[in-house]
Image: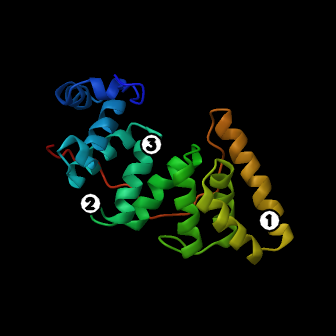
Amino acid sequence: MSSRQQPVIATTAQTVSHDQIKSLAEKGDAEAELQMGLRYKSIAWGIKDDKIAAQWFEKAARHDLVEAQYRYGSALLEGQGVIQDYKTAFYWLEKAAQQGHAQAQFTLGEMYHSGLAIKSDIERAYLWFNLAAAQGVESAASARNIVVQLLTPIQVAAMQEEASRISLAQHSGHVASVPKVEVKNPVPAVVDKPL
């Protein structure tokens, strides 16, 4: 190796064969299900298929894996590999956001800001943008700084207090009691699909 080349360090997921990961995923291992989704989402593995990726993300999301909840919610939001479904996307993204997933928090803020799947709510948009910005999501900080101008000081203080409570609950390992928006039939029944 020349002095300018960097050593390549393989992660555990990269060193495990596709067949080994698939075998674990088929047995219900949530991490393996997520890895299968990521493999089918990426052309790097030579097997890009958004539909199969979404199916694996859904399985892992139903096993309460936060990253999978975000990935499946995003697939539903964008209609990648699944029929676009804003209400179900909101359900999964909210689950991930409540557990501290920064990108899910930002996306939830965008949904509240635009009124996508739910009634537009600038206060809730500010709340989720603020939480995502606190985790370093730069676009969330920019969005927060725009929507804060639309709120009264009392509204800002209330949302900052709620953000602190949610953040504290996330760091303690508990999901904070966040008022939920009613979404009718957000999660379709589990239907086993051949992969």
Displayed quadrant of residue 56: top left
Vertical comparison of 87 with 36: above or below: below
Q: Nearer the viewer, residue 2 or 28?
A: 2
**Where does residue 19 sit, x and y in percent of width and height?**
17, 28
Amino acid type, mark 3: Glu
**Where does residue 52 sit, x and y in percent of width and height?**
21, 48
Amino acid type, mark 2: Val
Q: Which residue is the extreme one toward the bottom?
A: 150
Quickly name the residue at label 1: 156
Quickly name the residue at label 2: 82
Vertical comparison of 134 with 32: above or below: below
Amino acid type, mark 1: Val
Q: Earlier in the sequence, mark 2 or mark 1?
A: 2
Quickly name the residue at label 3: 67
Distance from label 1 to label 3 (Cα)?
Answer: 29 Å
Q: Is residue 117 left or right of residue 102?
A: left
Q: Earlier in the sequence, mark 3 or mark 2?
A: 3
Label 1 packing within 10 angstroms: few (<14), some (14-19), many (20+): some
